[in-house]
Image (cartoon, rainbow, N blue to C red):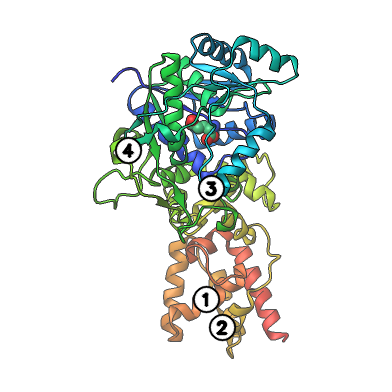
C-alpha cells in the first residue's frame, strides 16, 4: 500500500457529535494501523453555516478523545485561491463552463420538473455560449457560476472498500456547480482539490457522502488528479432505528465529557459502532492499542449501527473501575469541585482523601458526575435520610436501641480497620440472632443517608470511628425523639 494519508474534515457548523467522532476515530485507527498520517481539515467554505467559534470546540473534543492529528488544521477558507486556479484550469480546458442562468430561470426549471414528477437536472443551457454571448451577459450585470461539464452517458463507478462497486448513471448527474456566484467553491469541488493537494490516499467518511462521490470522481478526473480509495461508514441509528437526534439523549462529545464519561470508554464504544474485531462480535472491551492493531476496513459493516447508551454507560463503569486510580481521581476533581466537595485545585491532602473516596465509589459508579453526586456524605454529615430507606430500615421497633448498641460496640473496638469492623458485625449477628443485613442496613442509612454505596466495612473505616459513632448517635436521638 502506498503511504496512507487520511483526513477528518468536519464542517464547523456545530459541536462534534458521536457520528463525526466515529468518523474521526476510524480515520485515526486506520492511519495508526498503517503508520500513516492523520490530517485535520476544517471544511469552512460554507459561508452561511460555518462558525469560527466551533473550530476550537471541535479540536478540543478531538484532543479530549485522544485523537491527535499529525497535520493541520488546514482551513478551506484559506485555500480559495487554489480552488479558483483549479476552476480556471478546467475552464481553459473546456472541462467546465460559466453559467449565467438566473435563480429565477433555474427555479422555473425546477418547478417544471416537480410538475412532471421528475428529478431536476440542470439542462446544460450555458454549455456552448460564445465569448461574445458571455460578454453580453456580463455587461448586463449577470454574475456567473462555474459548472463542471459532465458526461451525459455511461456510468461512474465508486469502488468502495466497504460497499464494493457502487454504480451511478451519468445521465442522472447534471453539470453541477463547482464555483458559486459568490466565488466560493462548492463542497464537492473544494473537497477534491484539497484531497489532491493533501495527497489523501483513503477517504473514510459517513455514508451520507456516498452520493457525492461520483461527482467528486468526475471533478478529480477533469482535474487529472489521482482518485483516492473510498470507504463509506455505516449510519448510526437510534435504538428505534430512527435518525439519531437530541431526543435520544446526549450525542455531542462535549456532553458526554460534562456528564462524566471517560474518553477511553467513549472511544471503545465508538469503535464498535460499525466495526467488530472478530466474527463472533462478542469482544467488547478493547484498549486503544488493540483497536489499532486489529482495525481493518474489511471488518466494517455495511448495515447501520445502533446507538445504545446503556452499553456505553456499562463500558464507562468498566473503565472507571479498571483505570489508573490517580488518573481517574484527577479526572474526578472538576466533578467533585462542582458539588463543592473539593477545591478546584486540591492540594496533596485533599487529593489523597479524594483518591480514597474514588477508590471506594468507582466500584459501582457509572459516571464521574454520578460518583460526585453520590459522594457528599464522605465530606459532610449534612444529609437527609432516604425516605424509603427510613421506612424500611428505621421504622421497626427497637431500631434505635439496636443502633445504639452497635455504636457502643464500635467504640470499644481495638482499631477501626475494615476487617476488625467486619468481625464485630459477625459477632453481633450471632449474639443478637439477627441477620447481617438487618444490622448493616440501618447503619449504612445512618452514616450515609443512603441505602446503597461502597463496601460497608471500608466505608465505616474510611469515615473513622469518631465520625461513624457521632452519626449513629445522631440517628439514635432522632429515632428516640419521634
Ligand atoms: N465537511 C464534510 C462533512 O462534514 C466532509 C465530508 C468528507 O469527508 O468529504 O461531512
Badge 3 crowding class, 10 Å Cα cut-off, few under 14, some 14 to 19, many 20 or more, is few
Identity of the residue drawn at 40% across and 50% down: 305
- Earlier in the chain: of badge 2 and badge 3, it is 3
Q: Secondary structure at mark 4?
A: loop
- Distance Cα–Cα, label 1 vs label 3: 74 Å
- Earlier in the chain: of badge 1 and badge 3, it is 3
Front: mark 2 or 4:
4
- Earlier in the chain: of badge 2 and badge 4, it is 4
Badge 4 crowding class, 10 Å Cα cut-off, few under 14, some 14 to 19, many 20 or more, is some
- Distance Cα–Cα, label 4 vs label 1: 55 Å
Dot 2 corresponds to which residue?
A: 392
Residue furthest to the bottom in view is: 397
- Earlier in the chain: of badge 3 and badge 4, it is 3
Label at residue 116? 3
- Earlier in the chain: of badge 4 and badge 1, it is 4
Choose between 153 and 423: the one closer to the eye: 153
Residue furthest to the left in view is: 279
* Image quarter hosting the N terminus: top left
Amino acid at each position: 500500500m502506498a503511504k496512507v494519508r487520511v483526513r477528518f474534515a468536519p464542517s464547523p457548523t456545530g459541536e462534534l457529535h458521536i457520528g463525526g467522532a466515529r468518523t474521526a476515530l476510524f480515520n485515526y485507527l486506520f492511519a495508526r494501523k498503517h503508520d500513516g498520517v492523520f490530517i485535520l481539515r476544517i471544511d469552512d467554505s460554507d459561508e452561511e453555516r460555518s462558525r469560527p467559534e466551533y473550530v476550537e470546540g471541535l479540536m478540543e473534543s478531538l484532543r479530549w478523545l485522544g485523537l491527535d492529528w499529525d497535520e493541520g488544521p488546514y482551513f478551506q477558507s484559506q485555500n480559495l485561491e487554489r480552488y479558483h486556479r483549479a476552476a480556471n484550469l478546467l475552464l481553459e480546458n473546456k472541462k467546465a463552463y460559466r453559467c449565467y442562468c438566473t435563480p429565477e430561470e433555474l427555479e422555473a426549471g425546477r418547478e417544471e420538473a416537480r410538475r412532471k414528477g421528475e428529478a431536476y437536472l440542470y439542462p446544460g443551457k450555458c454549455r456552448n455560449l460564445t465569448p461574445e454571448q458571455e460578454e453580453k451577459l456580463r455587461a448586463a450585470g449577470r454574475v456567473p457560476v462555474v459548472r463542471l461539464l459532465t458526461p451525459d452517458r455511461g456510468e461512474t463507478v465508486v469502488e468502495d472498500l466497504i460497499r464494493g462497486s457502487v454504480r451511478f448513471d451519468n445521465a442522472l448527474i447534471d453539470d453541477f456547480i463547482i464555483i458559486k456566484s459568490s466565488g466560493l467553491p462548492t463542497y464537492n469541488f473544494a473537497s477534491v482539490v484539497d484531497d489532491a493537494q493533501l495527497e489523501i490516499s483513503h477517504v473514510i467518511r459517513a455514508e451520507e457522502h456516498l452520493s457525492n462521490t461520483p461527482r467528486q470522481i468526475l471533478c478529480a478526473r477533469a482535474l487529472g488528479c489521482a482518485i483516492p480509495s473510498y470507504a463509506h461508514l455505516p449510519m448510526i441509528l437510534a435504538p428505534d432505528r430512527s435518525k439519531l437526534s437530541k431526543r435520544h439523549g446526549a450525542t455531542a462529545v462535549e456532553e458526554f465529557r460534562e456528564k462524566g464519561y471517560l474518553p477511553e470508554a467513549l472511544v471503545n464504544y465508538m469503535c464498535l459502532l460499525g466495526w467488530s474485531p472478530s466474527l463472533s462480535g462478542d469482544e467488547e472491551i478493547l484498549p486503544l492499542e488493540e483497536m489499532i492493531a486489529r482495525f481493518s476496513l474489511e471488518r466494517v459493516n455495511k448495515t447501520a449501527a445502533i446507538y445504545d447508551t446503556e452499553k456505553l454507560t456499562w463500558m464507562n463503569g468498566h473503565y472507571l473501575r479498571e483505570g489508573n486510580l490517580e488518573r481517574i481521581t484527577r479526572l474526578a476533581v472538576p466533578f467533585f469541585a462542582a458539588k463543592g466537595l473539593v477545591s478546584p485545585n486540591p492540594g496533596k491532602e485533599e487529593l489523597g482523601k479524594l483518591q480514597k473516596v474514588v477508590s471506594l465509589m468507582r466500584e459501582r459508579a457509572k459516571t464521574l458526575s454520578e460518583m460526585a453526586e453520590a459522594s457528599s456524605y464522605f465530606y459532610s454529615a449534612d444529609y437527609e435520610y432516604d425516605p424509603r430507606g427510613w421506612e424500611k430500615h428505621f421504622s421497626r421497633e427497637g431500631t434505635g436501641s439496636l443502633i445504639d448498641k452497635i455504636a457502643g460496640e464500635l467504640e470499644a473496638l481495638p482499631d477501626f480497620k475494615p476487617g476488625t469492623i467486619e468481625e464485630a458485625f459477625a459477632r453481633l449477628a450471632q449474639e443478637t440472632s439477627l441477620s447481617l443485613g438487618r444490622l448493616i442496613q440501618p447503619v449504612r442509612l445512618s452514616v450515609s443517608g443512603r441505602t446503597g454505596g461502597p463496601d460497608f466495612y471500608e466505608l465505616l473505616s474510611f469515615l473513622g470511628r469518631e465520625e461513624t459513632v457521632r452519626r449513629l448517635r445522631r440517628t439514635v436521638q432522632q429515632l428516640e425523639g419521634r
